[in-house]
Amino acid sequence: MRLLNLTGTISFMKMRVAAMVLSGLLIIGSLVSLFTNSLNWGLDFTGGTLVEVGYDKPADLPAMRELLAQNGFEDAIVQNFGSSEDVLIRLSPRDGVKSSEISNQVVNALKSQGDNLDMRRVEFVGPSVGEELTEQGGLAMLVALLCILVYVTMRFEWRFALGSVVALAHDVLLTLGLFSVLQLEFDLTVLAAVLAVIGYSLNDTIVVSDRIRENFRKIRKEEPEEIINISLTQTLNRTIITSLTTILVLMALFYVGGALIHGFATALLFGVIIGTYSSIYVASLVALMLGISREDLIPQEVEKEGADLDALP
């Protein structure tokens, strides 16, 4: 299949069937994982106690899990935090037991092995607060999508608006699917990254939609599919430069920023890549499938009052 014609235009839309199949499979996989595995909710959403401890040597995580299970903490999630000597322990809430008591019990259980350790910090989030954050986070994404739908409808045309919202829902769903499949912790920083992905993807989609509208008005003899290909080719350099510079910054955050923002950087890295893809093969494709045409994008001339009288001799 030839993707580059004689005029130098890349025939993006020739790959639309393959793109639809790929997006469909990814969406199905994400939905299956979300319904079966759900998300690995962080303490911001579930509530519970987080204890950070530091050792003077690399920590033996399997032995720590076994020791905590023997002391009644079977649900403890134990993981390294930044280095092999620093450990995070997450525990679900316990009725009638204070967070300080839980942390002391955990530290005493770990010290029973004879290792030297010190408690760095203890955080507690109540389950009622967690439920409120979950509800408000989901509501924030829905409101964002509805506002985008209204804005793009007013700014461009309803076919572009629907394509933009489908692309944004596509990006959010695949990002959530990634965190569900890999069971990465989903906390407030990741939610902020998902909302940032919506903004980034929308910006890219708006640029592409504006160029498509401009070319529909300038180019008179080409079919809608070719006009979309021309528009995507013209914005390709801008898209690549913007995406690469953003990815470079996010790579630095991922590798140097520390464990606290790994989830944030991961969500944005994946979101930038998938958002660039959706701007080309989801938003534009939806508009094409809905039958976008030149007549839809040319503004209607409004007849001035008294024009007929001026035309009389």
Image (cartoon, rainbow, N blue to C red):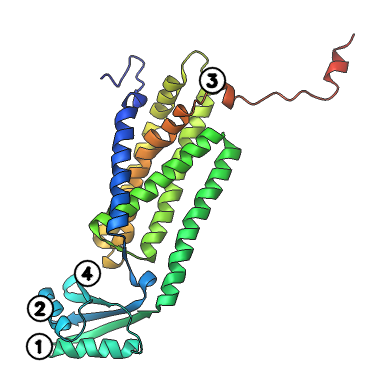
Q: Quadrant of the N terminus?
A: top left
Characterize the local packing of mark 2: few (<14), some (14-19) or many (20 or more) Cα atoms within 10 angstroms: few
Report x, y in % for residue 59: 12, 77
Q: CA distance from mark 2 to mark 1?
A: 10 Å
Report x, y in % for residue 159: 52, 33
Instruction: Name the one closer to the observer, 112 or 72.
Output: 72
Residue picked out by circle 4: 82
Q: Earlier in the sequence, mark 4 or mark 3?
A: 4
The amino acid type found where label 4 is placed reads Gly
Q: Earlier in the sequence, mark 1 or mark 4?
A: 4
Residue picked out by circle 1: 113
Q: CA distance from mark 4 to mark 3?
A: 55 Å
Q: CA distance from mark 3 to mark 1?
A: 76 Å
Q: Is residue 214 above or below residue 39?
A: above
Secondary structure of the residue carrying tag 4 is loop
Whether residue 266 is visible to the viewer of this picture, yes or no, is: no
Characterize the local packing of mark 1: few (<14), some (14-19) or many (20 or more) Cα atoms within 10 angstroms: few
The amino acid type found where label 2 is placed reads Ala
